[in-house]
């Protein structure tokens, strides 16, 4: 009997030992505190190290206000475009079979495998004066680089995969059954999307938008190459922080950095809230009967 009982014992799993489990949790908490929490505390402390007046005057400085304005405008342009691109790419990849489908998946992943600085340099060779399209834009007096269009293009390139990467696994898990049922009942493509597809992907979509927005506002490498670092004109908030730090205005640099830190905290809170709604996790929804609108009767 003892031999039978011993044969039925399950082999120990990694982490079953209480000492090992507590050790792993302790290491994670210590590293998290050192790598995440400590920098945020230092930013908050240094931002107010010279008092509220210096903090307020830094944020009221025209160059700082312009950097904040340019960062917000870039996000307002880049995030909606990347959202539309991500939804369209996910819809095409998961709902249709076509030649080049795998290639499209690879293209979407490219910004994650290329350094942002390399992407910025590539834009110089494409849209710069000596680039492929540069002479044509110069002939029509269209300024792309060292201006808002170049900053938006670089930000869009870096953040292009965020929405698509959140939607593609979820839409693959959901399959095509509901959309096919809607179209078989006479619903148009747009009505199928807004009545069937969008309600099933809304939390993952918001999840991707939040991550995309946070990355746009914090992007440094690609934007630093294509913007020209012109103070008060083409400096986004991350570039402005670097200029203040190089000018030995540490308190001003940390005051400006506190804005990005606040955005990061808000992003984390939004991320956790959306994860509780099911975003960020691939779940195959129950194939309940959705409210599929019937087709309009033909006259």
Image (tube, helix red, strand yellow):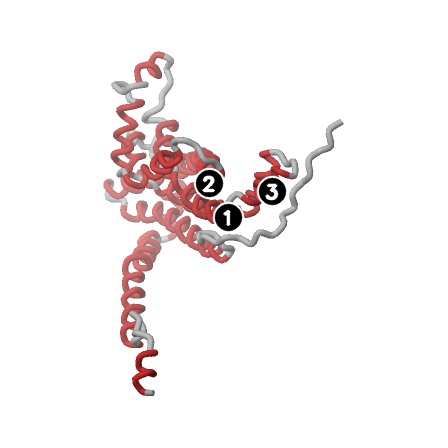
Residue ID for mark 2:
94
- How far apart are the alpha carbons under marks 3 and 1? 13 Å
Q: Is residue 203 left or right of residue 15?
A: right
Count up the numbered dots: 3
Task: Give the vertical position of 58 relative to 152 (above or below).
Answer: below
In three-dimensional space, the C-alpha distance between marks 2 and 3, rounded to whole angstroms, equals 16 Å
- Residue 158 x, y percent position in the rendering: 34, 37
Tell me, for residue 100, which label it has, or none: none
- Closer to the N terminus: mark 1 or mark 2? 2
Residue located 37% across and 43% down the image: 215
Q: Quadrant of the N terminus?
A: bottom left
- Residue under pointer 1: 174
Residue position marked by numbered label 3 in the rendering: 181
**91, 214: nearer the viewer:** 91
Left/right placement of residue 217 relative to residue 24 reads: right
* Mark 3: few/some/many CA within 10 Å (<14, 14-19, 20+): some
Q: Is residue 208 above or below residue 234?
A: below
Q: Between label 3 and label 1, give the one nearer the viewer.
A: 3
Image quadrant occupied by the C terminus: top right
Identified at 23% across, 41% down, the residue is 246
Residue 106 screen position, x and y as percent: 34, 37
């Amino acid at each position: 009997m003892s031999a039978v009982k011993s044969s039925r014992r399950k082999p120990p799993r990694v982490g079953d030992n209480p000492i090992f489990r507590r050790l792993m949790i302790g290491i994670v908490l210590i590293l998290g505190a050192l790598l995440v929490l400590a920098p945020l505390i230092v930013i908050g402390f240094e931002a107010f190290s010279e008092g509220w007046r210096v903090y307020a005057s830094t944020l009221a400085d025209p160059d700082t206000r312009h950097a904040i304005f340019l960062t917000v405008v870039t996000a307002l342009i880049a995030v909606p475009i990347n959202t539309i691109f991500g939804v369209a790419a996910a819809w095409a990849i998961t709902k249709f079979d076509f030649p080049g489908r795998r290639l499209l998946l690879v293209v979407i992943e490219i910004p994650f495998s290329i350094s942002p600085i390399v992407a910025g340099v590539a834009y110089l060779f494409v849209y710069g004066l000596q680039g492929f399209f540069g002479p044509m834009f110069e002939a029509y007096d269209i300024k792309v680089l060292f201006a808002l269009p170049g900053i938006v293009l670089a930000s869009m390139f870096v953040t292009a995969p965020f929405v698509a990467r959140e939607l593609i696994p979820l839409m693959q898990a959901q399959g095509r059954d509901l959309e096919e049922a809607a179209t078989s009942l006479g619903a148009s493509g747009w009505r199928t999307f807004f009545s069937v597809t969008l309600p099933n992907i809304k939390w993952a979509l918001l999840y991707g938008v939040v991550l995309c927005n946070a990355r746009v506002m914090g992007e440094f490498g690609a934007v630093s190459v294509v913007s020209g670092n012109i103070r008060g004109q083409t400096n986004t908030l991350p570039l402005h922080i670097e200029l203040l730090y190089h000018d030995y205005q540490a308190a001003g640099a940390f005051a400006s950095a506190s804005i990005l830190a606040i955005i990061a905290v808000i992003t984390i809170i939004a991320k956790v809230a959306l994860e509780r709604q099911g975003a960020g996790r691939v779940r195959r929804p129950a194939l309940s009967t959705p409210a599929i609108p019937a087709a309009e009767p033909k006259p």
